């Protein structure tokens, strides 16, 4: 028991100590952040070093450019920054400090004079150029006459100061504690490197045991960024830092090659972790040292050793934090994925909230059809009806007290029976009429009043029914929108699911075939709804996605899988993207033929075929009433609305009711359109017909012919109507034939067009949809001796079992597995 306690206590103690160390470290980082960034000490240190920075022996564009950037970005830190820059300049030389002080004085004067001017970001670089050039010309003109070389240096110094302002303006904001977006652009990375190299220039002349500070820290930064960003970032840091340092000290010109090569080599060896990057710096140091001045080899090795020492001591957490800012790193990718995930979750939540809103609105329009409420409503309507009648008749009758006080139940019952008789057939029951005449002293007056009031009552009932139907349609529409938005929210939140067994099988199978798989994402493996994405590399792509990978997936998942999307790299061994999904169980091949009245060009008939989501295929024919352009306009508008609404995912029945409401309310003209719609489910070949004022359709199955018909008025005649849906189960090789009334009623001298059409369709020797459509149209026109007396349209679809182009490839497993 004591042994177990002694074993547990150190673990708990270590965990507590680690927690305290983390808390202490976080507190220290927060304190440093406040001191360096919020209080501005980092800017003052940078200002001090940039005040010392000089290139080409006499050119110093850094100090004024830094002051201008602070003036623009952190104006409240300007005064302290001026003091820091002056202290740095004084540590270099008195002449240098005088120049820096005068140049900053001129800049502050110009900046203050034009502080209310617009476009400060354009004026500030110009002020830097003027202040630097004017001060340098004044300084040179006092001591000596300016030579052409001096004029060139003055111009170069002014231009460099202007450019550095633009660079520092992109670098200094990155140090802000309020920066929300951690991702850096490539331009920002280069600007930051230039700022770091400029700061290191201010350390030139500082040595420790023969090791130069600028060389140690420049190599440290090369190691750091090569380890984080790879060869591209490492070599860029080396080139920029080496170039600026060599301008400050010509003796360091060879250092540019050393830093650039070390950054490149260290980035290439970053897979070896820190030791690999350190080896890259050592190799670069030896090669450049041997190639250059051999006397500088030992100090150079010492400088590289110190840089590597600092590099190895750098905490791993620093690398992770820095990696978040560098594009191409794993941490940067994870940061972007987390951001995208957050945006996706927020978007899906908002869509789901809108879906709930539409659901609530739909519920508010839905009427609860309880029997109790119906009885109560009917009782209230009867009471109101009788009160209107009695107000006109019984109110002034001398028998009022006897009828409505002493014998209320009998009076109410008789008048209610009379109301019901009038409402049902318009005529009173003789027995009820005689009973009422013997009971009431003014039966004729009461009867006339009831007939008059009945007309108002029936009109009110019709209006109420229309309102109820309108509310039901609005409720259905809102419910449809809610369902579409809910499905959309689920689609946004589509997550990568874990299917370890299938994933191992896929990876193993592709490896056996020699296909290099870079990334595999399995989203769904539901039957008929497979969703898989892959990133692969091909030296030369020859359709392996559909020829090899899809058949292998079909064998693993036991269903037909096809390529849904592919983006192939244009160069060898590039990354290619392939998306795979379930193939449809059935495919549809269509054909259509039409002719306008009199052989004209404008037909009142219109037809369309629509590929809907969720594996559905729709065919529709619309016949505008009459002929000509107006009829065509009605039929085209009907199909346009149908296509737009169906493609949103709203149910077909709700879509048709919505279109009918739009057409009936859009115009007062008596222009109507029929609609013949067939929606085929490609997963099981189940078809639903919605026929609105249209002619029958036919299904040909071998020698058997099935007639499909329904009775609904054309669209636009009445605002509310019930849609009858007729369903059929299709088989493979079935032919679905839809037609307008010009075809169905077109044959001349034919007593029964139904039997005639069935015989013609049954006798056709071809199964090609286009040939059948052409033959039916031709046969109808022949019966009329070539005359076309109405618009004619016929659409034929052939439903076939989907047979994949490539057979599935069996996956063989090793016996060891």
Image (spheres, rainbow, N blue to C red):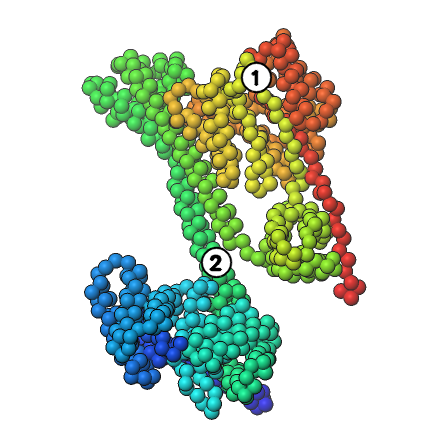
Where does the C terminus fall, quadrant-wise? bottom right
Residue, disc 1: 742
Residue 468 position within the rendered picture, expressed as x and y whole percent measured from the top left? 39, 32
| Element at label 2 | helix
Query: In the image, what residue occupies the spot 48% across and 34% down?
Result: 655
Residue 486 position within the rendered picture, expressed as x and y whole percent measured from the top left? 48, 47
Residue 55 position within the rendered picture, expressed as x and y whole percent measured from the top left? 39, 76
Say if 187 sits above or below 492 in the image.
below
In front here: 448 or 578?
A: 578
In front here: 617 or 403?
A: 617
Say if 85 sits above or below 615 in the image.
below
* Count of picture labels: 2
Residue 729 position within the rendered picture, expressed as x and y whole percent measured from the top left? 65, 33
Residue, disc 2: 340
Q: Say which mark, if any, is on residue 562.
A: none
Q: Residues within 10 Å of mark 2 (few under 14, many from 20)?
A: few
């Amino acid at each position: 028991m004591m042994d177990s306690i002694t074993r547990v206590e150190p673990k708990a103690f270590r965990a507590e100590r680690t927690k305290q160390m983390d808390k202490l470290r976080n507190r220290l980082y927060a304190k440093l952040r406040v001191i360096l960034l919020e209080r501005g000490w980092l800017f003052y240190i940078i200002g001090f070093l940039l005040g010392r920075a000089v290139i080409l022996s006499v050119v110093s564009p850094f100090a004024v450019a830094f002051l201008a950037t602070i003036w623009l970005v952190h104006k409240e830190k300007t005064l302290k920054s001026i003091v820091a820059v002056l202290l740095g300049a004084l540590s270099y030389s008195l002449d240098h400090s005088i120049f820096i002080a005068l140049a900053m004085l001129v800049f502050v004067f110009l900046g203050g004079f034009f502080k209310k001017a617009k476009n400060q970001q354009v004026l500030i670089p110009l002020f830097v150029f003027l202040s630097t050039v004017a001060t340098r010309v004044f300084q040179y003109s006092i001591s000596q006459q300016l030579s052409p070389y001096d004029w060139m240096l003055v111009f170069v110094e002014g231009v460099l100061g202007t450019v550095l302002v633009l660079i520092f303006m992109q670098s200094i904001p990155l140090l802000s504690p309020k920066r929300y977006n951690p991702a850096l652009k490539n331009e920002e990375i280069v600007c930051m490197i230039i700022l770091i190299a400029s700061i290191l220039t201010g350390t030139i002349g500082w040595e420790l045991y023969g090791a130069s500070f600028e060389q140690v820290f420049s190599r440290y930064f090369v190691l750091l960024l090569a380890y984080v960003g790879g060869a591209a970032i490492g070599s860029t840091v080396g080139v920029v830092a080496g170039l600026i340092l060599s301008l400050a000290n010509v003796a360091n010109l060879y250092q540019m090659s050393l830093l650039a090569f070390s950054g490149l080599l260290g980035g290439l060896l970053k897979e070896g972790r820190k030791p690999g990057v350190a080896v890259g710096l050592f190799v670069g140091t030896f090669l450049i040292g041997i190639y250059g001045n051999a006397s500088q080899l030992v100090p150079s090795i010492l400088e590289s050793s110190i840089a590597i020492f600092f590099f190895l001591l750098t905490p791993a957490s620093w690398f992770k934090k820095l990696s978040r800012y560098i594009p191409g790193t794993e941490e940067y990718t994870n940061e972007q994925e987390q951001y995208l995930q957050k945006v996706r979750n927020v978007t899906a939540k908002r869509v789901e909230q809108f879906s709930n809103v539409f659901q609530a609105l739909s519920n508010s329009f839905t009427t609860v059809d309880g029997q109790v409420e119906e009885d109560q409503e009917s009782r209230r309507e009867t009471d109101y009806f009788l009160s209107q009648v009695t107000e006109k008749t019984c109110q002034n009758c001398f028998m009022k007290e006897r009828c409505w006080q002493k014998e209320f139940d009998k009076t109410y019952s008789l008048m209610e029976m009379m109301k019901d008789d009038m409402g049902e057939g318009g005529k009173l029951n003789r027995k009820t009429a005689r009973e009422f005449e013997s009971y009431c002293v003014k039966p004729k007056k009461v009867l006339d009043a009831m007939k008059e009031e009945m007309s108002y009552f029936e009109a009110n009932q019709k209006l109420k029914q229309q309102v109820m139907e309108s509310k039901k349609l609005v409720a259905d529409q809102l419910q449809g929108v809610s369902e579409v938005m809910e499905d959309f929210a689920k689609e946004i939140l589509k997550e990568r699911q874990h299917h370890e067994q299938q994933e191992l099988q896929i990876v193993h199978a592709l490896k056996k075939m020699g296909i290099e798989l870079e990334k595999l994402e399995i989203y769904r493996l539901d039957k008929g709804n497979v969703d898989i994405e892959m990133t692969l590399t091909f030296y030369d792509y020859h359709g392996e996605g559909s020829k090899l990978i899809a058949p292998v997936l079909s064998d693993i998942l036991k269903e037909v899988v096809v390529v849904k999307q592919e983006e192939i790299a244009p160069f060898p061994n590039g990354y290619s993207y392939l998306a795979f999904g379930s193939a449809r169980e059935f495919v549809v091949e269509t054909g259509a033929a039409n002719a306008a009245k009199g052989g004209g060009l404008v037909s009142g008939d219109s037809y369309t075929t629509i590929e809907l989501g969720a594996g559905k295929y729709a065919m529709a024919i619309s016949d505008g009433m009459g002929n000509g352009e107006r009829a065509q306009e009605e039929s085209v508008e009907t199909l346009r609305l149908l296509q737009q609404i169906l493609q949103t995912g709203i149910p077909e029945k709700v879509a048709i009711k919505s279109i009918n409401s739009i057409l009936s309310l859009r115009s007062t003209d008596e222009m109507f359109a029929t609609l013949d719609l067939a929606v085929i489910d490609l997963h099981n070949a189940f078809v639903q017909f919605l026929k609105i004022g249209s002619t029958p359709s036919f299904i040909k199955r071998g020698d058997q012919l099935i007639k499909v018909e329904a009775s609904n008025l054309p669209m636009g005649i009445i605002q509310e109507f019930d849609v009858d849906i007729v369903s059929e189960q299709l088989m493979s090789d079935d032919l679905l034939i839809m037609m307008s009334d010009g075809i169905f009623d077109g044959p001349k001298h034919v007593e029964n067009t139904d039997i005639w059409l069935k015989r013609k369709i049954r006798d056709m020797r071809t199964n090609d949809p286009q040939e059948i459509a052409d033959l039916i149209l031709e046969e109808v026109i022949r019966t009329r001796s070539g005359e076309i007396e109405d618009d004619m349209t016929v659409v034929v679809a052939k439903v076939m079992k989907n047979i994949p182009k490539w057979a599935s490839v069996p996956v063989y497993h090793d016996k060891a597995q």
